[in-house]
Image (cartoon, grey):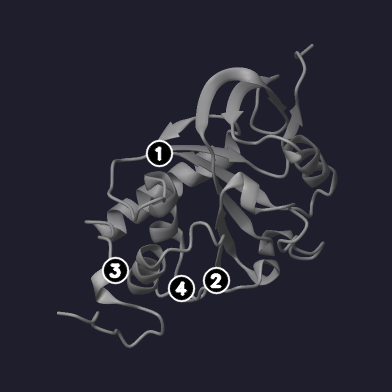
């Protein structure tokens, strides 16, 4: 066919679809548990099952979206990642609204250089801190050892990791995010099939643990 077949949901083309989870109920529960583990044990590198994803999107990031998004959870996507294949696939499989306003988004999907700062996302309120944005950031590489020094809840002493791609102002942004607790955002970092959590409760430094 010369023209894509339109779906009843705005902006959705069946020609652009990427497959969803083969076993949605079981796999969504499994991915949800891995996300909870990542956020409760910050800096722990987890591996999600292989799954094809739209071009330019990490497989782990795509699976997180498939498992956690639904009609009641809005998503902000950085322009560099907002391909027709991704948007059509998420609208079809999740039914989630795509919002151009990151300050009102339940979830966000971005690369490190497309964010600018973390303050622009919803920070939650003192009454409902859980209503903040969960930010999924695609980084270059995640390693279990490196110069990043993490401490705080869920970490016994200090955990050292390497997060390639979070450069420039990112250290200051993460430290400000921690200082704003209980407000602030929680981050899910992805690299291919890999996942690592950086919740707002985590202290981030670039010096040796004492």
Separation (CA) of disc 3 from disc 4: 16 Å
152 shown above or below 121:
above
Relative to 66, 175 lies left or right: right
Q: Which residue is mark 3?
A: 16
Q: Are marks 3 and 1 in contact (CB under 8 Å)?
A: no
Q: What residue is shown at x 41% (from left), y 46% (from top)?
A: 58
Q: Are marks 1 and 2 in contact (CB under 8 Å)?
A: no
Q: What residue is shown at x 27% (from left), y 57% (from top)?
A: 21
Q: Residues within 10 Å of mark 3 (few under 14, many from 20)?
A: some
Q: How many marks?
A: 4
Separation (CA) of disc 3 from disc 1: 21 Å
Q: Which residue is mark 1?
A: 192
45 shown above or below 125:
above
Residue sitting farthest toward the front: 2
In terms of depth relative to the viewer, which is nearer, 140 or 23?
A: 140
In terms of depth relative to the viewer, which is nearer, 92 or 16?
A: 16
In the rendered structure, find residue 6 and report the number of the disc placed on it. none
Relative to 36, 167 lies left or right: right
Residue 177 in the image: x percent, y percent? 78, 46
Tell me the quarter of the picture where residue 48 sits: top left
Residue 109 in the image: x percent, y percent? 54, 56
Q: What residue is shown at x 18% (from left), y 80% (from top)?
A: 2
Q: Which residue is mark 4?
A: 96
Relative to 149, 38 lies left or right: left
Question: Of callouts 2 and 4, which one flags the residue occurring earlier in the amino acid sequence?
Answer: 2
Foreground: disc 3 or disc 1: 3
Q: Are marks 2 and 4 in contact (CB under 8 Å)?
A: yes
Foreground: disc 4 or disc 1: 1
Separation (CA) of disc 2 from disc 4: 6 Å
Question: Of callouts 3 and 1, which one flags the residue occurring earlier in the amino acid sequence?
Answer: 3
The N terminus is located in which quarter?
A: bottom left
In the rendered structure, find residue 74 and report the number of the disc placed on it. 2
């Amino acid at each position: 066919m010369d023209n894509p077949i339109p779906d009843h949901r705005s902006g959705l083309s069946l020609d652009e679809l990427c497959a969803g989870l083969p076993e949605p109920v079981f796999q969504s529960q499994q991915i949800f548990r891995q996300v909870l583990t990542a956020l409760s044990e910050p800096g722990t590198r987890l591996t999600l099952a292989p799954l094809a994803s739209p071009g330019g999107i990490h497989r782990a990031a795509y699976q997180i979206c498939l498992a956690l998004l639904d009609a009641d959870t809005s998503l902000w996507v950085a322009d560099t990642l907002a391909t027709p294949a991704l948007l059509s696939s998420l609208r079809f499989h999740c039914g989630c609204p795509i919002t151009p306003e990151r300050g009102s988004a339940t979830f966000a999907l971005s690369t490190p250089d497309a964010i600018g700062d973390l303050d622009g996302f919803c920070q939650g309120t003192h009454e409902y801190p859980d209503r903040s944005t969960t930010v999924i950031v695609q980084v270059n590489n995640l390693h279990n050892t490196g110069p990043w020094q993490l401490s705080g809840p869920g970490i016994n002493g200090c955990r050292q990791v390497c997060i390639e791609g979070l450069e420039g102002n990112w250290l200051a942004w993460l430290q400000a995010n921690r200082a704003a607790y209980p407000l602030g955002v929680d981050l899910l970092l992805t690299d291919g099939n890999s996942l690592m959590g950086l919740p707002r409760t985590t202290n981030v430094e670039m010096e040796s643990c004492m």
